[in-house]
Amino acid sequence: MTKKPNPVFIFSFLSFLKRKQEKRDIHIQDRLFYFFLKGLSWSLIFLFFYMLFVIFQMSWPAFSHFGMKFFVNIEWNSWTKNFGALSLIYGTAVTSFLALLLAVPVSVGVALFLNELSPGWLARPLGFVVEMLAAVPSIVYGLWGLFVLAPVLRDYVQSFLSKYLSFLPIFQGNYYGVGMMCGGVILAIMIIPTISSICREVFRTIPEANREAVLGLGTTRWEMLKIAVLKGSSTGIIGAVIMGLGRALGETMAVTMVIGNATSIKASLFEPAQTMASILANQYAEADNELHLASLTAVGFSLFCLSLIINILALLLVWRMEKKFYPRRKNRKNNVFSIGKVKV
Amino acid sequence: MSDVLVKIRNLSASFSSVTVLKNINLEIPSRKVVAFIGPSGCGKSTFLRCLNRMHEEVPGADIQGQIFLEGQNIYEKHIDPVLVRRKVGMVFQKPNPFPGLSIFDNVAVGLKLMGVKKRVLYERVEDSLKQAALWGEVKNILKRQGTSLSGGQQQRLCIARALAINPSVVLMDEPTSALDPISTARIENLIRRLKEKVTVIIVTHNMQQASRISDKTAFLLSGELVEYEKTSKIFTNPSEVRTESYITGRFG
């Protein structure tokens, strides 16, 4: 038995079409503009996934040849065509960890000072300079690291460490300036603006009444900062740190110039090493066989995925922090001037 | 005739040369509830913030005159504001338990900073929560985050936090304006009981609230103290015309 189409339905459908038609006639430029911007946004999303796909495709020969052993193999040898990423992962992990170790206390301290303690006339220019650290080109950091920082580290810091702390395996062996330590220090300087500016944003989300409530308990300023600001924003600070980590992992040029470029795993921070990013910068031009190139791309693909995960994690943490104090931002859509939907 | 706890002499306060309080003189008896009413912007909150030396935390703030707390001028040079604030607790308009701290720690944090021994810490926290009429609801969930409580419970937690350090005065800046009527009623009951132990100075926009809970009421209008009398007198037979027109709703 076939159903007769419901006349009411047809009517309402027609009227819907008609309404749509009217809207188009009235707001034709608005609609064109809307679709243009929509197209731009979608093309970015497309580009992102296309990149991910292409890099994966290019690195497939390496993954299929080495399998999961690619990530646990120490050797990286283009002569024997034996490629493993472990030494690169090690170099990346050590330099990034060292960078966080140095940068986090400085960044949090700077953010605390700028937001909570310093008078307005000082906070603005100082904050500006800290942000400007992020604007220095990576290659300039590299040059400075190679010609200024590395000799200084060698003559003053590493000589001191190897003299007095050489019982620790991380401070043993010969020192040349360039190496994992230099890479870590450069990275630390480069991620300070990232971490401190996110920390400042996070500290700003804490209501003024919370600070006064702690002060009202009869606390000193330091105790107030500890309880109201630092404890209250711990999630956000972790987010900021992870954001800085994301930046440190992917940083290429400056690290390539100061890390010494050796694919080996050594405990000493004085030793040269290679990070996932630096080996790409060093070797992509001279990769003479397909497997070498595929292995390099595979490293790039892994780095891409790693940064992606790290950044998503960081964003989630920072968002969660914002939600904590401003939890009800529903109906946001209603405020937006929406053309594609019902009302205009 | 009860003894005077807070004596305010010629108090004037300003924010970057805008005068907010003009020459206030009044005396607050101990173990009573004193309400401050007046239209928005009349200086009620600034007045409260002068009493625990919080006003000076704002850049550009200035203050003149004397405030005697238990006979001691808290604005004298050698007085540490940190110690003043231990005598004067404060509760804010929006409940603001410290995020990241458990219910227990929210109350204990002030005690810990004062160096209260671990052995007595639990008792002191329990006492404060009992005084704030919250113990029964939270005794099994002390480890939970303070922010996970309902609005009214959060505000009582903030009262417990203020009470924990044994202040002689508790300042409340519109403590119920963010709460529903039932939570408000509970807090009002609580305030009535609190005066057995401490003096409560409360700022409120709700005149029924002032008449329900306070012993004395002060009416502030654009920074001036218009009238300060027994609550029953203010609400039935005010001596000033301005007070009468405000409480009868003719302005404000």
Image (tube, coloured by chain):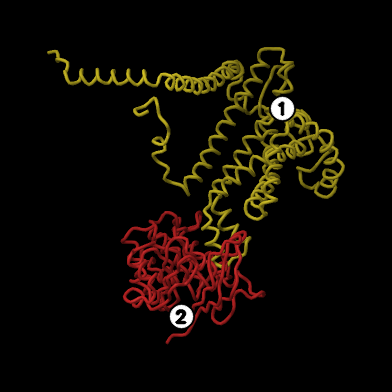
Chain colours: A yellow, B red
Q: For the residue marked with disc 1, what is the amino acid?
A: Ser
Residue B65's x, y, as percent? 59, 74
Give how far apart the Cα atoms at labels 2 and 1 are: 72 Å
Residue A89, quarter of picture: top right
Taking B95 as reference, is A297 left or right?
right
Residue B22's x, y, as percent? 53, 70
Taking B231 as reference, is B145 left or right?
right
**Is the residue A58 above or below the residue B228 in the image?**
above
The quadrant the N terminus of chain B occupies is bottom left
**Is the residue A88 above or below the residue B41 in the image?**
above
Viewer-side residue, A71 vs A280: A280
Is disc 1 surrounded by few (<14), some (14 to 19) or many (20+) residues within 10 Å? many
Q: Which residue is mark 1?
A: A278
Q: For the residue marked with disc 2, what is the amino acid?
A: Ser
Taking A4 as reference, is B35 left or right?
right
- Say what secondary structure mark 1 lies in: helix
Tag 2 subunit = B
Residue B205's x, y, as percent? 39, 63
Q: Which mark is residue B30?
A: 2
Residue A94 visible in the displayed image: no
Residue A65, quarter of picture: top right
